[in-house]
Amino acid sequence: LETYPGEQFNYASINYDILGLVIQKVTNQSFEQYVQNNILNQFNMGNTFLFRKDVAKYDMSKGYKIGFLKPIEFNAPIYRGNTPAGYFISNNEDMEKWIRMQLGIYGLSDDQQKAIYSTHIPNRSVPPSGDGSSYAGGWQVFQNGPGEISHAGSNPNFSSFVVFHPQEKLGVAVMANMNSDYTQNIGQAIMDTLVGESVVTNGKDTYKSIDAFSVTVLLFMVPFSIITLYFIFIVMIQVYKKKRKLEKNKFK
């Protein structure tokens, strides 16, 4: 932890994996089976899956990641242990349903809607994060204007962003088949446009910046390594031809 417990909020995806394990222990079902029976089936979210094999018969987009300054196709390994945190597979139809549930316009029962709204209650026991948000049940809650709730996420080859304004009944979801900060930038720009706020146009992509830095370092290290190996080779040849002697360390 960067601070003492209770002083500041720090996001950690692994906490969702722990929650998934708790669900398994309490219900004696796998996390995937519990979600399937109690959420996806209950709310007619037939286009959302938790196992990649279940999507094989559908035309699922191929995933990409930035590599050597351009997007490259990348089939990320299956990471079942992180399913609760970021490996749901869905489409625009089911994401629309999910947003409508958050906005209270999906036709849920009173108890179901109360459960949804309870996840929007921010934790005010600690100061807001650097971006001004407080954390709720899986959501970042911003107090600017009428109130904004959002969450972004990514895994090695996909990313998503959901943002909504409960009072104005507006919601936006963006999904991309590449791990990129631009996914959030696009979604936020759409929401800002809808509510008449200024749009930030100079958004950066952390993944792209990291890749560019790595390529720069590599371009420097490759010739440096070649030159170093060349001189080592020359020295070895000189030693072999007895044109150079290796002095032994003398210890007294």
Image: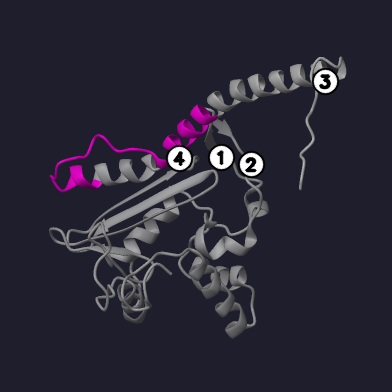
**Residue that label 1 marks:** 63
Residue type indicated by callout 3: Val
In this rendering, the label closer to the viewer, 3 or 4: 3
Task: Report the Cα–Cα distance between label 1 and label 2.
Answer: 6 Å
Task: Report the Cα–Cα distance between label 4 and label 2.
Answer: 17 Å
Q: Residues within 10 Å of mark 1 (few under 14, many from 20)?
A: many
Across and down, in percent, residue 170 comes to 23, 55
Is residue 105 something that shows in the picture?
Answer: no
* Secondary structure at numbered mark 3: helix
Relative to 65, 190 lies left or right: left
Residue type indicated by callout 1: Gly
Residue type indicated by callout 2: Asn
**Residue that label 2 marks:** 75
* Secondary structure at numbered mark 4: helix
Q: Which mark is residue 145?
A: none
In percent of the image, x 54 and y 28: which residue is there?
68
Residues at discs 1 and 2 in contact (Cβ within 8 Å): yes
